[in-house]
């Protein structure tokens, strides 16, 4: 199959951990690579966000990243990208009319918008129907519910996103919670498939180098530094544990830049204030952004990995932790409801509840045997259910249904 993945703001080429670079970048890169490993040809279309990028960038065997010119050749925050999507769609349509893929898969609502626009033009120019699958990665309706007036998404997202969901040939939700939300958009269940994100189980392994650590019990968070990731709640939970006599520390990984350049981010200042208020200056390390390749060693150095977002469309970090054989304490939100199994691979707590978080983490820190049991079960769950080869196979089944349907329609048309 010739597969076009469209990811307007999240390029596989981007640096991870910054405000707009996170799970979607990892997802698109890994999905593309594993689809190609299964014998398919994959082009990833992303906005040209730096000067001097070549027309086509070989990314992995069978995978090419195609930077599309739309707006300035510079980083533009994703909330400012909507006005550029017309130009982006023009370029997609031209590329696909010249060389038609078999299936298109949009990632994020704006990519879906541009993909549907371009695919419609391909149908007019070439006949037939170019099928479009859509993965949202995040839903505006959830973001708005959580962030209210602080949601900086363009106002049009409110009606354009549900429209993309209804017009796509299929919506690939990443978790059951998202599938449930999509029904609110009046997307028929038959057009919703659930395929989770995956994890590189060969890279994130329980055994291997371990990052330096102290004698203290180590808690770890890995995330972009934005308030909704709940890093502040993890610090507050550590404060409670330390006051209760637990000798623990927290390593916070993430942020735009390394440990010495974090000051530029507003969230860092907020977190430093929480650290000061809790008197934890010597027990919390803001480690900054760590290269994805080096993360396994950090996961392995942790006794418990905390994922405490207020909401989370999917959340790849708990899978990475599980794949490294580490127990996870996670809030019961979004994709974390599916990935972390209560009292099997970790524990669930309500969001924004440092007290409950401290209790769950404290119980685990006091019980090394249970930590090991959760860790082993996490590794096994990640390897059997969330390997990228399995996710690629599930995704290919979805594409196969779409291309079969197209072939059937063409045959019926001919008859
Ligand atoms: N990540 C990283 N280095 C960092 C911070 C994050 O490589 O310093 C990666 C992390 O390993 C994970 C991704 O960024 O693969 C974050 O994905 P997740 O789905 O958990 O959250 P998102 O950022 O998409 O909201």
Image: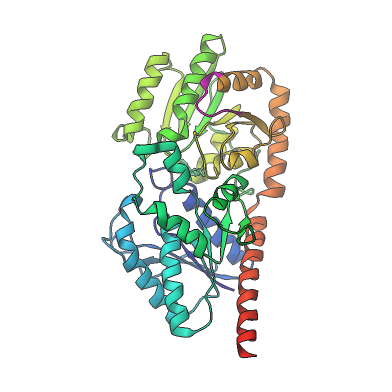
* Residue 279 pos. (x, y %): 41, 13
As drawn, which residue projects farthest toward the bottom? 415
In the visual, does 139 lie left or right of 331?
Answer: left
Q: Quadrant of the N terminus?
A: bottom right
Q: Which residues are magenta?
A: 349-355
Q: Nearer the viewer, residue 47 or 380?
A: 47
- Tell me, yes or no, if residue 291 can be seen here: no
Q: Residue at x 55, y 52 (%)?
A: 182
Is there any visible trace of residue 47 in the rendered image?
A: yes
Q: Which colouring convention does the figure follow? A: rainbow
Picture coordinates of residue 368, whole percent (x, y): 69, 22
Residue at the location (35% across, 68% down)?
54
**Residue 354 inside the magenta-drawn segment:** yes
Q: Is residue 209 magenta?
A: no
Q: Is residue 203 above or below residue 218?
A: below
Asked if 151 appears above or below 388 in the picture, the reply is above
Place of residue 192 in the rendered image (x, y in percent of width and height, measured from the top left): 61, 58
Would you place residue 62 above or below residue 321 in this image? below
Q: How many marks?
A: 0
- Quadrant assignment, res 335: top right
Name the residue rendered at 59%, 64% in the picture: 35
Question: From the image, which quarter does the C terminus lie in?
Answer: bottom right
Q: Is residue 160 left or right of residue 243?
A: left
Q: Is residue 37 above or below residue 317?
A: below
Nearest to the observer: residue 69 or residue 337: 337
Q: Quadrant of residue 172?
A: bottom right
The quarter holding residue 45 reads: bottom left
Residue in the picture at 47% in, 56% down: 162
Residue 332, how many percent across, how many down? 59, 34
């Amino acid at each position: 199959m010739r597969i076009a993945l469209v990811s307007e703001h999240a390029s596989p080429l981007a640096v991870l951990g910054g405000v707009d670079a996170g799970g979607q970048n990892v997802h698109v890169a890994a999905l593309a690579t594993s689809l190609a490993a299964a014998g398919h040809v994959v082009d990833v279309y992303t906005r040209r966000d730096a000067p001097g990028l070549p027309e086509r960038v070989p990314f992995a065997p069978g995978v090419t990243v195609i930077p599309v010119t739309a707006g300035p050749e510079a980083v533009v925050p994703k909330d400012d990208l909507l006005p550029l999507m017309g130009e982006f769609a023009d370029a997609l349509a031209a590329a696909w009319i010249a060389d038609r893929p078999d299936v298109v898969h949009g990632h994020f609502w704006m990519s879906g918008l541009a993909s549907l626009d371009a695919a419609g033009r391909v149908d007019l120019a070439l006949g037939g129907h170019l099928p479009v699958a859509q993965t949202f990665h995040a839903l505006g309706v959830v973001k708005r519910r959580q962030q209210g007036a602080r949601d900086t998404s363009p106002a049009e997202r409110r009606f354009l996103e549900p429209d993309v969901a209804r017009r796509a040939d299929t919506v690939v939700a990443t978790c059951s919670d998202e599938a449930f939300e999509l029904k609110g958009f009046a997307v028929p269940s038959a057009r919703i498939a659930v395929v989770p994100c995956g994890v590189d189980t060969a890279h994130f392994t329980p055994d291997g180098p371990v990052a330096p650590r102290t004698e203290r019990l180590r808690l770890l968070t890995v995330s972009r530094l934005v308030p909704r990731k709940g890093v502040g709640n993890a610090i507050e939970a550590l404060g409670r544990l330390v006051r209760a006599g637990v000798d623990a520390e927290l390593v916070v990984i993430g942020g735009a830049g390394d440990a010495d350049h974090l000051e530029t981010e507003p969230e860092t200042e907020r977190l430093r204030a929480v650290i000061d208020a809790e008197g934890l200056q010597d027990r919390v390390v803001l480690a900054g952004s760590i290269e994805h390749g080096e993360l396994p060693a950090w996961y392995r150095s942790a006794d418990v990995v905390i994922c405490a977002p207020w909401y989370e469309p999917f959340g790849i970090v708990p899978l990475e932790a599980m794949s490294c054989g580490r127990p996870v304490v996670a809030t019961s939100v979004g994709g974390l409801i599916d990935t972390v199994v209560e009292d099997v691979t970790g524990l669930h707590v309500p969001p924004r509840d440092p007290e409950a978080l401290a209790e769950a983490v404290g119980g685990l820190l006091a019980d090394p045997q249970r930590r090991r049991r959760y860790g082993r079960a996490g590794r096994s769950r990640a390897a059997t259910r969330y390997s990228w080869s399995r996710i690629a196979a599930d995704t290919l089944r979805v594409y196969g249904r779409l291309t079969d349907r197209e072939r059937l329609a063409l045959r019926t048309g001919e008859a």
